[in-house]
Structure formats: structure tokens, C-alpha cells
Image (tube, rainbow, N blue to C red):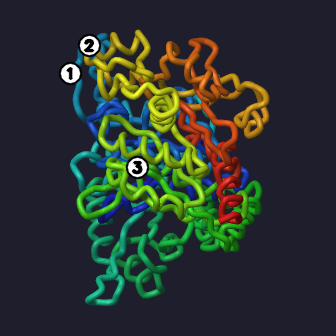
Amino acid sequence: MTKYIFIGGGVMSSVGKGITTASIGKVLQSRGYTVTAVKIDPYINVDAGTMNPIEHGEVFVTNDGTECDQDIGNYERFLNLDLSKDNYMTTGLVYLSVIQKERNLEFNGRCVEVVPDIPNEVISRIKKVEEITKADFILIEIGGTVGEYQNMLFLEAARIMKLQEPENVLFALVSYLPIPSVVGEMKTKPTQTAVRTLNSAGIQPDLIFGRSSRPLDEPRKKKISIFCNLREEYIFSSPDVESIYQIPVNFEEEGLGDKILEKFGIKEKAHDLTEWKNLVERIKNVKEEVSIGVIGKYFETGEFNLMDSYISVIEAIKHAGWNENVKPKITWLSSSKYENGENLEELDAFDAIIVPGGFGTRGTEGKIKVIEYARNKNIPFLGLCLGLQLSVIEYARNVCGIKDATSREFDENGNNLVIDIMEEQKELLRNNNYGGTMRLGSWDCNIKKDTLAYSLYGAEDITERHRHRYEVNNDYRNILEEKGLVFSGINRDKDLIEIIELKNHPYFIACQFHPELKSKPLSVHPLFVGLIKAGIKRKGGL
């Protein structure tokens, strides 16, 4: 029988439920069990595709084109899996499904009710994942925080499943324990309140993970045990760590795997976390740094920076750095500061530069100035999605002499749209059909031999994940090629540019896809490895 572990959050959002879920999964994998994970987002949005990355964080994309929460990326990176649309649901998607069934008379004319019909739809989707994957364990992360109105129906689904299959369901609570600076003591009251709120939903947590800046001590564990009705051995410490990849090792040292199997009455199959422990040791022992400048616009929110907007880019840089035994030092650079051609000299201090993806006109001229500077000053450069499009615009303007080169996204009536949109996309936009309609998911790419891309991938045929509407306009391919721009990767089915690069440059390459979405700590992505190697070489020569 498949076993289910629901993971909810207490006290505040962004407490680390996704990483905790992924870490639980890694621990269970190390015991020889198959694991998959499901994320439930409490938003009315049908998927994450229309959400603002500054508000919601990165939109992750799976092979099948599902636009989803960034935690799906965490699951893929930790569990070394490729997940799908079945591993993600939102309130909007669940309600939409129930309404469509009602319209199709699938409820046989009876009254359709919020309870139990919405929770039952959630359960049916979880059961579908079981049917497809045949996994030993399914981990279900419930977004939001216990006590919020938005996730009550998902808690209800967990309660019903626990009622129906008590021997197959556990509930874990990831709760924050603050240490107020004026008090200097870790406080358990917020977690106690969270557990009582969970109790009011008919759920008693079987496991509690105490998130804090420091490890839980025995007095705190004892207090949580008494007031939250849970033995101390099922309360786990989850302090801040330098690397998130250390968390499964910490959990295993606390006996998490044993306790979960004990709760379910399962015997251990195996016990091997060696490869993961070796990764953690490598991360700890890396000393030499390589500096990476990331030119973005989705990290400024008031007085704070939100790095979650680029989480997969961050992790891909780290994976490649650790693979080459260096520690990437990432600096966030706002593209707006370069729009007037100022401050560009500060880029000389970096070993490599990345221009990641994005939408809209804001900050694009600054990014174009950065790309021009990196090209002329021989700074290793990697462009991702929009980064490729802006690289083509920059080259068209400054090398090909097409001074008004632009994208239809920035100027619909421009004279020289070197970046344009496919005909089928034009029709979608005319009808205001935005959600889930971009070029999404895994697409084939053929790589030309004797190119930088081929030397990195070591293969002619690859697949990569996409999320964009705009493409390089083939009407300008000849002039761009004549002036030295190399189109090293092509999608043959639709004759679309996938990779560009420059010869006689230390490392200048850009791709229309999002390679960061496929990078995993034990399976690094070649485009990022190439950038790190070029950065190391530049660092040695500076």
C-alpha cells in the first residue's frame, strides 16, 4: 500500500515546507523506497503561469509544460525526478475540475457541495499520482499556513484520508520558532498555537519540524511535546543551514527515516545516503570563490530583495560551481542602473555574467548595455531565454548596423522586429488568451557540430524546457550569420533558433530555453558548467 505524508506549515509562510518535503523524500529514497511529491497551492489561479514572480517567486516548468510553483523544482532537484502536471494542483484547478464535472452531469444531478466534493477532488488527484507512479511514498505539501482560510479545504482532504486510511497517512507540521532579539530565547508559543489550530481542523500532527535560526534544545522539545501532544522523539530540529542540501543529512542524523518507518510499521529496505553525504562534504570543503553577476529585475520588492524569483538559476550556478570545486559568489545587479550606459565598468570585477529570463520592457535597455559590454570586454556570458533575445537585438544594433532593432514585445509597430512572435501566438494574444499558451515544456534541439554548444553537450540532439512567446525572426538570420553570430542550436520541427554563440570569445552563449530548470546537484547542466569553467579561467588571468 502506498503511504502518504501531508506536510503543512505553521506560524508564517516561507518557513521551508518545500525543502522539508524534498528532504523527507530524499531520506526515504535512501532507504530503498520510491518517492514522489505533490504540491498544493492555495491560489484561485489555475496554474502559476500568470503570477508575478516578485509576489509568488519563480514559475517552474516541467517537461510536459506545466507552469507551477518553485517547490516542484525543489522536489526534482532533491529526488532526481522529472515531475508532471499530476504533481501540482491549485484551488483554482480543483474548483475548475469540479465545476466541469458538474456541467457534464458527472454528479448525476445531485447538489454539489464544497465539502465533501472539493476535498474528494483533491484526494482523487492524489490517488491518480499513486496510480501513475506506483510510488511507495507520496508526499503532499499543502501551501500556505495553518489557520488560513485558503488552505482549509486541503486540510479537510488530509483529515478525510486519515479517517479512511489511518494506517497509511501521516501529517507533518513545519513550524517556525522565533528568537526575539530583545528576549534572547527561542519561543514555542507560536508553534503551540499552530498545532491547536491544526487540531481544530481535526488533525493531530504525527511529526513536527521546528524551523529556527538555531537547533531546538531539549527544554524546547519538551515544551512542544507536552503542549502539542507528541512524544519528543517525533519532534525534529530544522535550523538554518549554509546549504539546503545538508538538511536530509541532518534529518537522518536525528533518526527521521527510522521514525517514519516505525510510524507506518514498515521494515527498512536499505540505508544508503552516501552519494548525498559526499555532495554535502564537497559543498562544505569548497574554498575558492568565483564571482557571478546576475542582471535581473525581479528581486526588488520595497526595501527587500526576493531571490526566489530566480531560485533555479541560483541553484544551477551552485551545482556547476560545486562540480568544479569552487564556491559561486552571486551578486544581484539591477538592470535599471545600466540603462544610460553608466556603471558598466563595475562589471570588470566579475568572473562571469548571466542575463536571465523575464517579461516586459522594464530594464531591457540596461540588459542590452550589459550584453554589449560583456561581448566587447571578453567577460564570460550566459543568456537565458530573454537573455538570448536581447543578445540578438544587441548584435543586430551594434554589429549589423540595424540601429532600431527591437522585439515585438517591446514595440509592436517597430520597423525591425528581429525578435517576433509565431503566428499561432498572435492569434492567442488577439483573444487575450494568456494562461498556459506560451511555448512551454520540453522541445527538441539539434546542435551543430564544431560549435561551443556541441562541445558542452557532447550530443547533436537534446531536449530542453521552454517558457516564452517570442522567437528570433528568421528574416534576419542571414545578416546576423554574415556578421558572425553563430546559430548553433535549432528546433527542426518549426525551424526556431534555440542557441546562439560567438567565436573568438572566452565564453559567449545564449539559449532560448531555460537550462536552469533541468539542473540537479548530482546531474549538473553543461551550459552552467561551461560558464563556471570560463569564469575560473578569467579569474586566474585577472
User: Observer-nearest residue: 272 or 481?
Assistant: 481
- Residue ID at (39%, 62%): 15
Q: Which residue is mark 2?
A: 431
Looking at the rendered structure, the kind of residue marked 2 is Asn
Q: Which residue is mark 1?
A: 111
Viewport quadrant of the N terminus: top right
- Asked if residue 247 lies left or right of residue 140, the reply is right
Contact? badges 2 and 3 (CB < 8 Å):
no
> How far apart are the alpha carbons under marks 1 and 3?
50 Å
Q: Which residue is mark 3?
A: 296
Residue 186 occupies quadrant: bottom left
Q: Earlier in the sequence, mark 1 or mark 2?
A: 1
Label 1 or label 3, whichever lies nearer to me, is 3
Looking at the rendered structure, the kind of residue marked 3 is Gly
User: Observer-nearest residue: 40 or 241?
Assistant: 241
Question: Which secondary structure, mark 1?
Answer: loop
Note whether residue 319 is visible.
Answer: yes
